[in-house]
């Protein structure tokens, strides 16, 4: 359906939208954006699949796993759909390299794609079914993020709190639930929406990201089996939005549903770190290239940005997780090594003496006039020069997006670290042609590591 009229309850409107929307109701550009999101997701999951955090999670969950019906991307193990969803969500988000809906700072695909792929693999769903379920779930997820004011600022990790709704919606679509059951699934998801910003540079973040995917799928299964939920679980007086935020905008939540596509505004990172740090890296790389600055030439650096940048990134760096959300390391990496990739944010380099010394020279300042995602970098050199660079739209932003070819290159780079990436060009081609695939079994087999 091209439009969904507002009704008394948000969940009721979303239920009809998720179940009744047809392939041709979605603009081709939005469907293509879904493919970009899925391809970027695959690369991120492959790149992290053998990280110690994933090893631990697999070791814990396999003790309790059910029948092995779903692929764990980048690994030889198979698991039940719930636990595979958990692991694949964590892998996709682990290195802070996944996609971003910039208005909300939600990373849409990590919570939503894993249950879609797990169910599709189990049920033999077509590639077109996968694309449509994913983009409908991600649309619900991003609209929830748009609608609730004060949510992220209060300390809720918006990717996980909104991601569980997206996962529930997408799973409902693939399970072929009724609009009423989908409404119920969203209500059940409202009681499972959790995750806090304080834990972002810690392993507890992994748990909340994994749970958003797993619990969204679980919500749809419970709804399928007859569990119920309050009609206004999302927007009611004691519902999710008002419990976790200041106000809820029904226009942002369900206005123009089916005509204004939030998932069509998804973006993709060129650097594996917090999205608000990207303009800093861009500015430092430009200064290094334009003026030939090396770390040895730097006396001091001042980074100015929005309150959000300062709040998220003005932190001590105690490990590589801290480095990925650090203003100071986002300066150190490009000036020391001329890049801001996975290697430059890894533990050995992030905690090395060179990086520590240069981070000490960096000071962060708040500029309330700077928009989120922008930054100004001012450098004083040993030669007495004062150099400055401002970046408003970082590489990878909606205004300055990665091309399809750049997403492919990023995916190849991540895949090169994992034996499951041996046929990555075949996988890339299959994703671009996903809408013509009878099922996704072939892609998922390619994404499994050899035993």
Image (cartoon, rainbow, N blue to C red):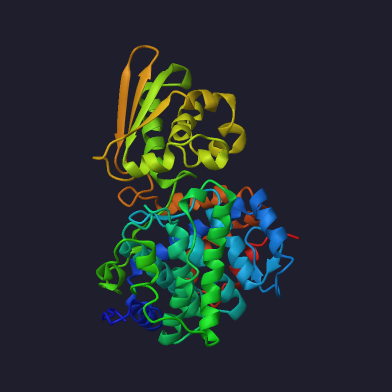
Residue 300: image location, x then y, percent: 40, 21
Residue located 51% across and 78% down the image = 220
Rendered image quadrant of residue 120: bottom right
Viewport quadrant of the C terminus:
bottom right
Residue 360: image location, x then y, percent: 47, 24
Relative depth, front residue between 175 and 13: 13
Residue 61: image location, x then y, percent: 69, 64
Relative depth, front residue between 118 and 166: 166
Q: How many numbered discs, if any?
A: 0
- 93 above or below 112? above
Rendered image quadrant of residue 231: bottom left
Viewport quadrant of the N terminus:
bottom left
Q: Is residue 436 visible?
A: no
- 304 above or below 78? above
Residue 337 lies left or right of residue 306; in this view the side is right
Relative depth, front residue between 36 and 360: 360
């Amino acid at each position: 359906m091209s439009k969904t009229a507002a009704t008394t309850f948000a969940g009721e409107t979303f239920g009809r939208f998720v179940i009744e929307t047809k392939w041709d109701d979605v603009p081709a550009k939005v469907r293509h954006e879904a493919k970009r999101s899925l391809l970027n997701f695959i690369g991120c999951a492959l790149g992290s699949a053998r990280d110690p955090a994933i090893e631990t999670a697999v070791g814990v969950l396999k003790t309790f796993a059910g029948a092995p019906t779903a692929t764990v991307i980048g690994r030889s193990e198979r698991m039940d759909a719930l636990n595979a969803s958990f692991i694949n969500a964590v892998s996709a988000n682990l290195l802070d390299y996944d996609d971003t809906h910039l208005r909300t700072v939600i990373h849409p695909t990590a919570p939503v794609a894993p249950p879609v792929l797990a169910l599709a693999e189990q049920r033999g769903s077509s590639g077109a079914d996968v694309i449509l379920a994913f983009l409908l779930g991600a649309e619900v997820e991003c609209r929830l993020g748009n609608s609730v004011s004060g949510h992220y600022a209060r300390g809720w990790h918006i990717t996980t709190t909104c991601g569980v709704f997206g996962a529930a919606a997408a799973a409902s679509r693939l399970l072929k639930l009724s609009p009423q059951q989908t409404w119920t699934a969203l209500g059940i998801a409202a009681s499972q929406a959790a995750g806090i910003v304080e834990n972002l540079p810690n392993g507890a973040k992994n748990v909340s990201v994994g749970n958003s995917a797993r619990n969204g799928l679980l919500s749809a299964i419970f709804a399928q089996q007859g569990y119920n939920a309050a009609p206004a679980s999302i927007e009611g007086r004691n519902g999710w939005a008002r419990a976790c935020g200041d106000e809820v905008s029904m226009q942002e939540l369900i206005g123009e549903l089916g005509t204004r596509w939030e998932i069509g505004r998804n973006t993709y990172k060129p650097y594996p770190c917090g999205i608000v740090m990207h303009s800093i890296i861009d500015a430092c790389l430009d200064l290094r290239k334009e003026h030939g600055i090396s770390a040895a030439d730097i006396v001091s650096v001042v980074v100015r940005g929005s309150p959000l940048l300062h709040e998220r990134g003005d932190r001590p760096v105690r490990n590589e997780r801290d480095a990925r959300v650090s203003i100071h390391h986002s300066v150190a990496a490009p000036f020391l090594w001329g890049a801001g990739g996975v290697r430059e944010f890894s533990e050995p380099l992030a905690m090395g003496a060179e990086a520590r010394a240069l981070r000490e020279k960096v000071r962060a300042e708040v500029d309330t006039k700077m928009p989120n995602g922008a930054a100004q970098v001012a450098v004083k050199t040993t030669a007495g020069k004062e150099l400055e660079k401002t970046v408003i739209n970082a590489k990878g932003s909606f205004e300055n997006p990665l091309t399809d070819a750049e997403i492919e290159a990023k995916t190849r780079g991540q895949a090169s670290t994992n034996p499951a990436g041996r046929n990555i060009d075949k996988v890339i081609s299959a994703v671009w042609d996903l809408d013509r695939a009878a099922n996704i079994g072939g892609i998922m087999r390619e994404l499994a590591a050899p035993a």
